[in-house]
Image: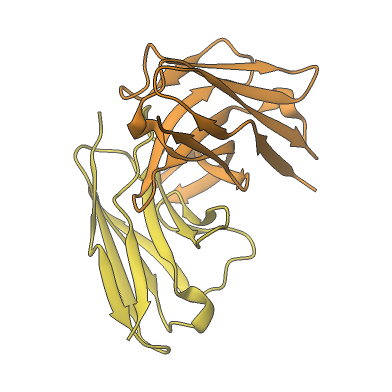
């Protein structure tokens, strides 16, 4: 079945680095954009980054821009999130999610709409001294 | 960046209640609005996309509507498995911002 599995989380000191992986299966990986979303303890969901289906476009949240890098290896059906200069406030469960899309009529606006599905189960990153 | 303002932040409700959650975008998003359900320790689950389209497999008691930059998620008759946190998200442009979330609690 369609599945995403995150790995690479753990405990790391402030200022250090960590690389998360998101392994995909059950679908044509090279046809989909993949996102990272995080949830800090007791907080809501925060979008982090996206990489397009072909890797040509990448976008980041301001909170991680310049510190995090998203990449993909289609030969391994895997997306990575390289996290450098980690801060206490980066502590969170990190989820990867596939961007799916379809045709819908939203009121009078018919077009191609997108959503995140599926999501992985998440991997916990704890930044602490 | 587009800001998503969701309310209420929490709601004390009972099984069988009709529940309405609202979300407002800071600018037009042309109905690129998604609703998710999130339970602790689980992956978020998409309920509604394109503001009002029900995701396959989602019960029909969930519905979404839109009016300009305002959006509503309605649960017509709350079931025990619906106690969770709900988020709206705009997928119109990056960064794909979420609302702050609405936690449904048992009264």
Q: Is residue A90 visible?
A: yes
Residue appearing at x 32%, y 83% in the figure: B13
**Chain A colour as displayed:** orange
Residue furthest out toward the left: B26
Residue appearing at x 60%, y 13% in the figure: A55
Q: Is residue A107 visible?
A: no
Q: Position of residue A122 (x, y in %)?
A: 58, 44
Residue nearest the observer in this picture, A16 or B95: A16
Residue nearest the observer in this picture, B84 or A98: B84
Q: How many marks?
A: 0
Q: Is B91 placed left or right of A12 in the picture?
A: left
Q: Position of residue A11 (x, y in %)?
A: 52, 33
State whether residue A108 is above or below residue B86.
above
State whether residue B38 is above or below residue B29.
below
Q: Is A129 placed left or right of B67 in the picture?
A: right
Residue appearing at x 35%, y 49% in the figure: A44
State whether residue B50 is above or below residue B65.
above
Q: Is A8 placed left or right of A28 in the picture?
A: left
> Where, quadrant-wise, is the C terminus of chain B in this rendering?
bottom left
Q: Position of residue A103 (x, y in %)?
A: 56, 43
Quarter of image, res A65? top left
Residue furthest out toward the front: A129
> Where, quadrant-wise, is the N terminus of chain B in this rendering?
top left
State whether residue B36 is above or below residue A111.
below
Q: How is the image coloured?
A: by chain
Q: Which chain is yellow?
A: B
Residue appearing at x 33%, y 76% in the figure: B19
Residue nearest the observer in this picture, A88 or A69: A88
Residue nearest the observer in this picture, A5 or B22: A5
């Amino acid at each position: 079945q369609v599945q995403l599995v995150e790995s690479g989380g753990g405990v790391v000191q402030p200022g250090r680095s960590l690389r998360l992986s998101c392994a995909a299966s059950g679908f044509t990986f090279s046809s989909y954009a993949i996102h990272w979303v995080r949830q800090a303890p007791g907080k809501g969901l925060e979008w982090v980054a996206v990489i397009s289906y072909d890797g040509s476009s990448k976008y980041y949240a301001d909170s991680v821009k310049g510190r995090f890098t998203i990449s993909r290896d289609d030969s391994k059906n895997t997306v990575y999130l390289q996290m450098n200069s980690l801060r206490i406030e980066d502590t969170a469960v990190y989820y990867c999610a596939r961007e799916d899309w379809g045709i819908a009529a939203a009121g009078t606006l018919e077009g191609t709409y997108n959503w995140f599905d599926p999501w992985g189960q998440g991997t916990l990153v704890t930044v602490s001294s | 960046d587009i800001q998503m303002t969701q309310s209420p932040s929490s709601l004390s409700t009972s099984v069988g209640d009709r529940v309405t959650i609202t979300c407002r975008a800071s600018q037009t998003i042309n109905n690129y609005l998604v609703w998710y359900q999130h339970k602790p320790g689980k992956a978020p689950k998409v309920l509604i996309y394109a503001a009002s389209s029900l995701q396959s497999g989602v019960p029909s008691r969930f519905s979404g509507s839109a009016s300009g930059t305002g959006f509503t998620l309605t649960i017509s008759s709350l079931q025990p498995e619906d106690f969770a946190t709900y988020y709206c998200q705009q997928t119109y442009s990056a960064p794909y911002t979420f609302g702050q979330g609405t936690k449904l609690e048992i009264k």
